[in-house]
Amino acid sequence: MALELKNVTYENIIKKFDYVFDEGNIYAILSSSEKEREVLGKIIGGLINKYDGKVKSIARIGYVYSNPDDMFICGTVNEELALCLNNSNYKDETKNKKISDVLKMLGLDDNIKNVNPLNISSSEKRLLSIAISLITNPKILVLNEPELYLDDWHKRNLIKILKKISKRYNKTIIILTNNVLFSYEVCDNFILLNKGEIIKSEGKKELLNIDKELEMSSLKLPEILNFINCASKKNICLNKTYDIKELMKDIYRNVN
């Protein structure tokens, strides 16, 4: 166990959230409510302390805001990352290596070190915000809507990076989002919230079979699933999938 929330309740926003997060897994917490996502993420990340229930963890937790700009307070990328290491006893040479290593891990060019973080691209800002949390080597990483501000290429790349971080370094990653497709592509397990309560928690494959629960929770079904459901109404039987290549193969089999 990396983290346990026991009957966590906050005002009328989060209600008796009860869940155990295991080490080395990626979890997607799905909610249509921006407030729910923000509050729950901050409770897990230790930024909100007044709540009912218990949060049990002996591990260091890093929190990434949904808006990367909220994490920037320094004049350069290098200063942002160095600031996170100020409470350590690292020598300057070690600090510089750690900064270069975390930038490399996230696919960021070392040349942006001397650039103002507000002047880099939206995708680079997102990756930098994650680097700021990762550089202190947290065991648990909480990300609020990490797919925001990313184009498709960077989104796919981020999924690869998060999976690599989780498995190689045995980190627990918790993602709060309203994006069902992104959740399916990145997570091992998902938790579905509706009006602050858990209504479903399963392995990611079950996301293919809970259309009604997703719609009841005001979450948008991915277009690929809408297409498959539409085909079903016309007596064209296609296997449910979020993989466009698998869908095309299935369509080809049906045509022939």
Image (tube, rainbow, N blue to C red):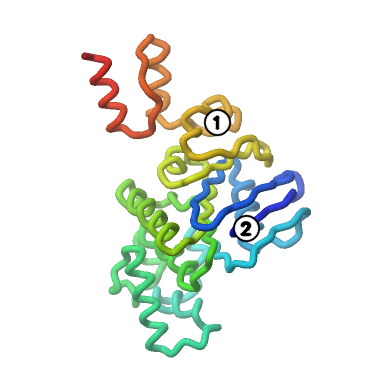
193 or 72, nearer to the observer: 193
> Looking at the image, is 117 positioned above or below residue 254?
below
In the drawing, does residue 39 fall left or right of residue 95?
right
Residue at point 27%, 32% (across, down)? 245
- Residue 44 rendering spot, x and y as whole percentages: 63, 58
Q: Which mark is residue 214?
A: 1
Q: Residue at x 49, y 32 (%)?
A: 220
The quadrant holding residue 110 is bottom left
233 in relation to 153, above or below: above
Label 1 SS: helix
For the N terminus, which image quadrant?
A: bottom right
Q: Position of residue 141 (x, y in %)?
A: 52, 60
Q: Quick check: 188 above or below 41?
A: above
Specify the amino acid type for callout 1. Answer: Leu
235 or 22: nearer the viewer? 22
All told, the count of numbered labels is: 2
Residue, disc 2 = 3
